Image: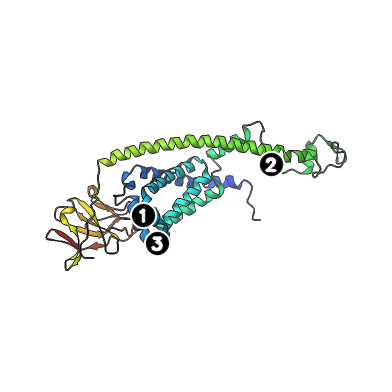
């Protein structure tokens, strides 16, 4: 009653095609997008993986682990970008689908633990949903419209031991086919009764032919699968290299924010001194640290006009960046956008605005009231 119906995996494979397409396209795009953005790998960028890990360390339930990993942020960033690309391509083409799905669960669940664990209510965080969306492919792989299916088919039909699939037959059917079947259910090969337990035709292949077949089929699948995987990986690597090159050329001409980090001074009646006003470029921004270590951002959209905010995005805490060309504060993680005049949400998924702090200039120094 609880056993799977006939051809269950194939049916599941067809039913899961829309989800497989979505995850494949999304992860391919996510990987290429990171690879095309040199800021993501930069340790000095407030929108890079390093800044995001520093932010995650403060709140994540696995902060003890992230603490050790944060110094390898650039390496982890590359591993994540290439991993996402491999997972996306694997699902799209149905190549090593189970392994790709296990990778997807691993990345999504790691992001859940490090970035979106405290999202409230929990269903607004996407990482947990992604982790669960990958699990059907861990169970059934990519059995239809896939390179895996093609490799399996080629592996079972391409060699000398033609198809050796196991089939269930009644003894009546065996007798009808067997050349040793004699009248009165007797066996001419054993001179005894026709019996599955003593049948030389049924017993011999079980121990030798079937084993030989499974071994050779496994070898063929491994060789063909390895060759297809190598060609696909080479194609993906070439695409990634081109995208990375184009991204670097494109990014070099569009700096969006300044990496200046202001050095805080002491608290005064004017507020907390965060640094020299002249260090914040006109039309740019600079970062500073709030007393609890959370990043802050101060802008000078036009000469002499300053605004300061808690830079932690209210959605899941990634530090926002100032984009002068669009006159917006933008979160690099999920794209929330905020008005630089008052911190209000322009575009979600964040549902509340940035926390704003009054900022004044006294004798050339910037003070914020936090
Ligand atoms: S952390 Fe998700 S939009 Fe900012």
Q: Secondary structure at mark 1?
A: helix
The numbered mark, 3 or 2, whose residue comes first in the sequence reads: 3
Residue sitting at the far left: 363
Query: In the drawing, does residue 48 fall left or right of residue 16?
Result: left
What x and y, as percent, mark residue 282? 17, 51
Point out the frontmost of discs 1 and 2: 1
What x and y, as percent, mark residue 340? 23, 55
Q: Residues within 10 Å of mark 2 (few under 14, many from 20)?
A: few
Q: Secondary structure at mark 3?
A: loop
The numbered mark, 1 or 2, whose residue comes first in the sequence reads: 1
Point out the frontmost of discs 1 and 3: 1
Q: Is residue 225 above or below residue 290?
A: above
Distance CA(mark 1)–CA(mark 3): 15 Å
What x and y, as percent, mark residue 218? 61, 38
Quarter of the image that includes the N terminus: bottom right
Residue 53 marker: 1
Return the residue at label 2. Answer: 166
Q: How is the image coloured?
A: rainbow
Q: Is residue 22 above or below residue 370?
A: above
Distance CA(mark 3)–CA(mark 2): 50 Å
In the image shown, does 79 or 155 lie closer to the viewer?
Answer: 79
Q: For ligand 1, tell me if the residue under mark 1 lies within 8 Å.
A: no
Residue at the image point whose x is 40% and y is 48% from the top: 76
Q: For ligand 1, tell me if the residue under mark 3 lies within 8 Å.
A: no
Residue 213 marker: none
Residue at the image point whose x is 24% and y is 41% from the top: 253
Distance CA(mark 1)–CA(mark 2): 52 Å
Residue at the image point whose x is 86% and y is 36% from the top: 188
- Residue 351 falls in which quadrant of the image? bottom left
Residue at the image point whose x is 31% and y is 51% from the top: 47
Return the residue at label 3. Answer: 118
């Amino acid at each position: 009653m609880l056993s799977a119906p006939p051809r269950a995996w194939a049916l599941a494979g067809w039913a899961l095609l829309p989800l497989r397409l979505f995850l494949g396209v999304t992860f391919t795009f996510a990987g290429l997008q990171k690879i095309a953005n040199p800021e993501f790998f930069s340790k000095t960028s407030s929108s890079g993986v390093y800044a995001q890990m520093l932010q995650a360390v403060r709140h994540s339930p696995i902060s003890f682990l992230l603490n050790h990993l944060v110094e390898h942020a650039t390496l982890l960033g590359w591993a994540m970008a290439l991993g996402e690309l491999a997972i996306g391509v694997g699902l799209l083409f149905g190549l090593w689908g189970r392994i790709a799905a296990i990778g997807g669960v691993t990345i999504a669940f790691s992001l859940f633990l490090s970035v979106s664990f405290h999202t409230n209510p929990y269903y607004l965080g996407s990482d947990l949903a992604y982790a669960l969306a990958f699990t059907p492919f861990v169970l059934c792989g990519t059995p239809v419209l896939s390179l895996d299916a093609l490799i399996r088919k080629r592996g079972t039909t391409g060699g000398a031991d033609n198809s050796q699939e196991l089939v269930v037959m009644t003894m009546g059917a065996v007798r009808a086919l067997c050349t040793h079947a004699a009248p009165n259910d007797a066996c001419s090969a054993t001179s005894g009764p026709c019996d599955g337990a003593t049948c030389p035709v049924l017993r011999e292949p079980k121990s030798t032919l079937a084993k030989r077949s499974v071994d050779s089929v496994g070898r063929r699948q491994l060789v063909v699968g390895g060759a297809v995987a190598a060609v696909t990986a080479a194609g993906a690597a070439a695409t990634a290299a081109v995208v990375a090159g184009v991204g670097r050329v494109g990014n070099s001409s569009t700096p969006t924010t300044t990496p200046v980090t202001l050095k805080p001074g002491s608290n005064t009646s004017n507020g907390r001194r965060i640094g020299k006003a002249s260090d914040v470029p006109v039309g740019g921004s600079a970062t500073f640290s709030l007393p609890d270590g959370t990043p802050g951002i101060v802008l000078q959209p036009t000469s002499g006009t300053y605004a300061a905010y808690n830079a932690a995005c209210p959605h899941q805490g990634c530090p926002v960046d100032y984009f002068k060309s669009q006159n917006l504060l933008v979160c690099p993680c999920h794209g929330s956008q905020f008005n630089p005049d008052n911190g209000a949400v322009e575009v979600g998924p964040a549902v509340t605005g940035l926390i704003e702090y009054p900022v004044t200039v006294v004798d050339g120094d910037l003070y914020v009231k936090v």
